[in-house]
Amino acid sequence: MDEQLLNYLNNLLPQTEEWVKELEEQAKIDRIPIMDPVGINFLMQLIRLNKPKKILEIGAAIGYSALRMNEANPDALITTIEKDDVRYNQAVNNIRKQKKESSIEIIHGDALEELSKLAENKRSYDCIFIDAAKGKYKSFFELALPLLEMNGFIISDNVLFRGYVSDPNFEHPRYKKMVEKIRAYNEWLVNHPSFITTILPIGDGVAISYKK
Ligand code: SAM
């Protein structure tokens, strides 16, 4: 996003509580890619409007977005999955610190395995938020599908990844494969027969897929 526009929007965001600032600072110091301020505020607004009762997140990191989704709808029950040991422990501590253990359940494991277990246990969600390994979004989406209730929605973050995805001349060796995978995911997603998808240039690019 244009830097001037981003600064303008950032300046118009609502004030946050101290614990939010602390988590944002912790993520900055540890270089953990939590959702950016404009993106998280958009996600929170979607949650306020739709009031999902059960939310599933793939990619908890330190628990920042799970806690912010809880802030947007304290009545929602949130399940979040994190595979990294250090981040999982940080998330557990952060959720405990905010006394949100009864609203946010955190699963330690690889979502590629944990999603099937949730399906076996007949768990279901009305909102699913995908924010983990960018090259695996299609697998996450397919594995999450049996968990989604009718008229539920799936949000995928980073679908425009730093603006690289929409750049036809993008050629960075480090990100080339990932960018190609995100492009393929976006194409597949907008053509999925069971969903209507809108992609918005908010934050790092957000796709909202509504289950018909
Ligand atoms: N949603 C978080 C937030 O905004 O506060 C940020 C999540 S961060 C972008 C992505 C996280 O997904 C990382 O902590 C990473 O360890 C985790 N992750 C990546 N692949 C995963 C997988 N297959 N299963 C579970 N977690 C995964």
Image (cartoon, rainbow, N blue to C red):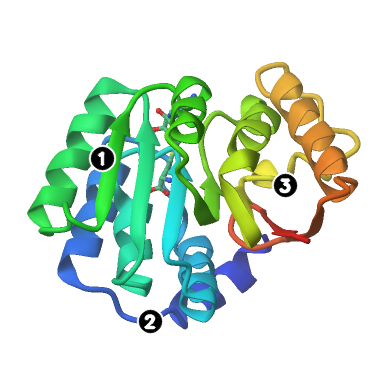
Image check: 117 left or right of 139?
left
What label sits on residue 14 in the rendered view?
2
Residue beneath disc 1: 29
Q: How many marks?
A: 3
The answer to which image quadrant residue 102 occupies is bottom left
- Residue at image coords 48%, 71%: 47
**Separation of residues labelled 1 and 3 (CA atoms):** 24 Å
Return the x and y of residue 126 as percentages of the image width and height: 54, 59
Q: Secondary structure at mark 2?
A: loop
- Pick whichever, 7 or 102, lies toward us: 102
Residue at the disc numbered 3: 163
The kind of residue tagged 1 is Ile
Q: Is residue 62 left or right of residue 72?
A: left
Left or right: residue 202 versus residue 118 is right
Position of 161 with respect to 71 (left or right) is: right
Label 1 or label 3, whichever comes before in sequence order: 1
Q: Nearer the viewer, residue 191 or 20?
A: 191
The answer to which image quadrant residue 134 occupies is: top right
Query: What amino acid is at disc 2?
Result: Pro
Q: Which mark is residue 154?
A: none
Few, some or many residues within 10 Å of mark 3 (<14, 14–19, 20+): some
